[in-house]
Amino acid sequence: MAGHHHHHGHSHAHGHSHGVASARNRKRLAWTLALAAVYMVAELVGGLMSNSLALLADAGHMLSDVGALALSLFALWMAQKPATDRRTYGYYRTEILAALANAATLIAISVLIFVEAVKRFYAPEPVMGLTVMWIAAGGLAVNVVGLMVLHGGRDDSLNIRGAWLHMLTDALGSVGAILGGVAVWAFGWMWADPAVSVAIAVLVLYSSWHLLRDSVGVLLEGTPPHIDLEAVRGAMLDVEGVEEVHDLHVWTITSGLDAMSGHVVVGERALRRESGEILSDLHCMLHDRFGLHHLTIQIEPRNFEEQRCVPLAGF
């Protein structure tokens, strides 16, 4: 009487809404990528002309933005590819790999900026403050537009959140570069430029750490932060006929797509009740209370042991 039931109804509907969301997100990313690429060149040229490390740091961050956005866009495109016999979940996880790569790149860039800034503290170099101010102000405008474009998708995708974080830290970097430019231009404080660069690097490190932690959590198939596993277990035990729940797992396939599997032991009396009813009750409850769509539940009688399987002769 051990039944294995896999629920598809909600999964298809959820997959469709996931597809619509990612189509919107692709558009958001494409627009932001175009903006960032154009301004990265302007900041790079401006940084070299004005000899400003803060501007070059911002341009380096913009370069990571462009790479991150391109990677995110590629990941969303890959995620649309259908599942195969070899890739039964499809390519959804590409999005998480892109988020991980984004985080790693941001951390590497911030370390490089930090090292260069320390050198400049010991040997300050002349900086064209006014040029820095104007170019950084343009960079800030581009980042603000990018943030507005990406804002709508940041809650339903780790990938978009990664891109949004890039733009946010970049916008704050531009604010820092403007302040550094003012300090150099108005007061001749050459140390302000590397000081601002260090502030940008710290900011980048802080934001990328959270992204790194979340994407590694998904890849390690950890329980999603918004799911309380014991609450899920308790709610399943409250369903009529369920005596025990074991081998319970909840994990994330990709942003906004959580899956659950578990074994449910039912008593003798419950076996007289249609096991389909128990499954139906479990599915409705898990969907309504915890937002879980992709469910695999195995129903077992009380004394069922999988280890009892006797090998067939000749095997």
Image (cartoon, helix red, strand yellow):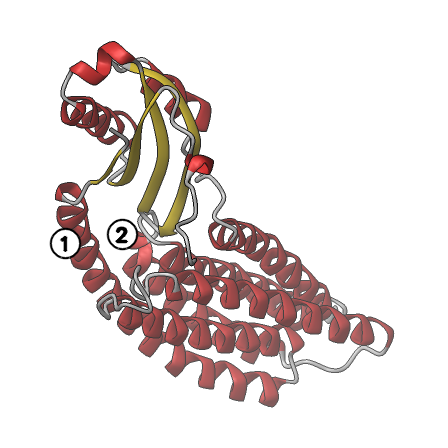
Residue 214's x, y, as percent? 50, 50
Whole-percent x, y for residue 123 in the image:
85, 78
**Which residue lies at the image location 62% right of the left edge and 72% below the top edge?**
109
What residue would you read off at disc 1? 16
Count of numbered labels shown in the rendering: 2
Q: Quadrant of residue 269?
A: top left
Q: Is residue 256 above or below residue 277?
A: below
**Residue kind at label 2, given as amino acid type:** Gly
Identify the residue shown where x is 61% and y is 66%.
182
Place residue 61 in its image quadrant.
bottom right
The residue identified by callout 2 is: 152
Residue lying furthest front in this view? 313
Please name whichever residue, 139 or 89, is drawn nearer the observer in this view of the structure: 89
Q: Measured along the vertical axis of the image, is residue 123 above or below residue 223?
A: below
The mark nearer the N terminus, 2 or 1, is 1
Query: Viewer-proximal residue, 149 or 130?
Result: 149
Residue 3 visible in image: yes
Q: Residue furthest right?
A: 122
Residue 225 in view, yes or no: no
Q: Are marks 2 and 1 in contact (CB under 8 Å)?
A: no
Q: Residue drawn at (58%, 66%), measured in percent from left and top?
A: 104
The secondary element bearing badge 2 is classed as helix
The one nearer the camera, 152 or 10, is 10
Pinpoint residue 94: horizontal percent, then vertical percent. 39, 66
| Residue 282, x across and y down, in percent | 24, 25
